[in-house]
Amino acid sequence: MSIKYRIAQIEDVPAVYQFAEDKLRVEFPDEMELMMQVWNSRFRKEALEHYLKMGWSFIAYDENNKLQGFFLGQPFLFFQGHTQTLWVEMITASDFKIEAELAEIAIKLSRDKHLQKVVLPKSVETLHFENTAVKFQKWSDECVWVKTTK
């Protein structure tokens, strides 16, 4: 299977949403439970519209133009002492190889655009990176947070 990668566009929202929902459906086959999980997900439609408009998210697709994975990213400016940081909110794919390639794209994109840091979901630590020796750093700053909604 040949996989291609490109910057996600706003027109990709329905396909990205469907891909993520289908993956979640495997874990939560009950429709009501699935709906509750989608409401609390990182791929809600308004989130996808936000991320895909920014131009820092990528999708993976096969020779039949079927979506095989994606990551949602956005830059932070002046975050924890770094001028520019890429935040990857979510990364998911049909298999671990594609997921690793998407993570590598996020890292390479950040290097090419001279960003100083990429913040990735912890799950990427378990992936095998074929093309790059990736040295993950633990989040060094101790933070606290406050929920500002009910």
Image: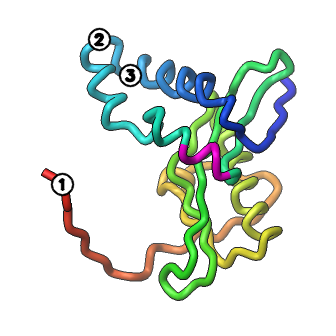
* SS at circle 2: loop
Residue at the extreme bottom of the image, as rendered: 81
- Identify the mark nearer the N-term, 1 or 2: 2
- The image quadrant that residue 44 belongs to is top left
Asked whether disc 2 touches disc 3, contact meaning CB atoms under 8 Å apart, the reply is no
Mark 3 packing: few (<14 Cα in 10 Å), some, or many (20+)?
A: few
Give me the C-alpha separation between circle 2 and circle 3: 9 Å
Question: In this image, 91 relative to 31: left or right?
Answer: right
- Magenta stretch, main secondary structure class: helix
* Residue 43 position (above or below residue 142): above
Question: In this image, 18 relative to 104: left or right?
Answer: left
* SS at circle 3: helix
Residue highlighted by disc 2: 30
* SS at circle 1: loop
Nearest to the observer: residue 46 or residue 85? 46
Q: Could you say which disc has been placed on residue 27 in the image?
A: 3
Q: Give percent across and percent down for residue 139.
A: 45, 74
Question: In this image, 102 relative to 82: left or right?
Answer: right
- The image quadrant that residue 75 belongs to is bottom right
Residue highlighted by disc 1: 149
Which label lies toward us, 3 or 1?
Answer: 1
- The image quadrant that residue 116 belongs to is bottom right
Q: Could you say which disc has been placed on residue 34 in the image?
A: none
Three-letter amino acid code at the position of disc 3:
Glu
Q: Which residues are magenta?
A: 50-54
Which label lies toward us, 2 or 3?
Answer: 2
The residue located at (52%, 88%) in the rendering is 81
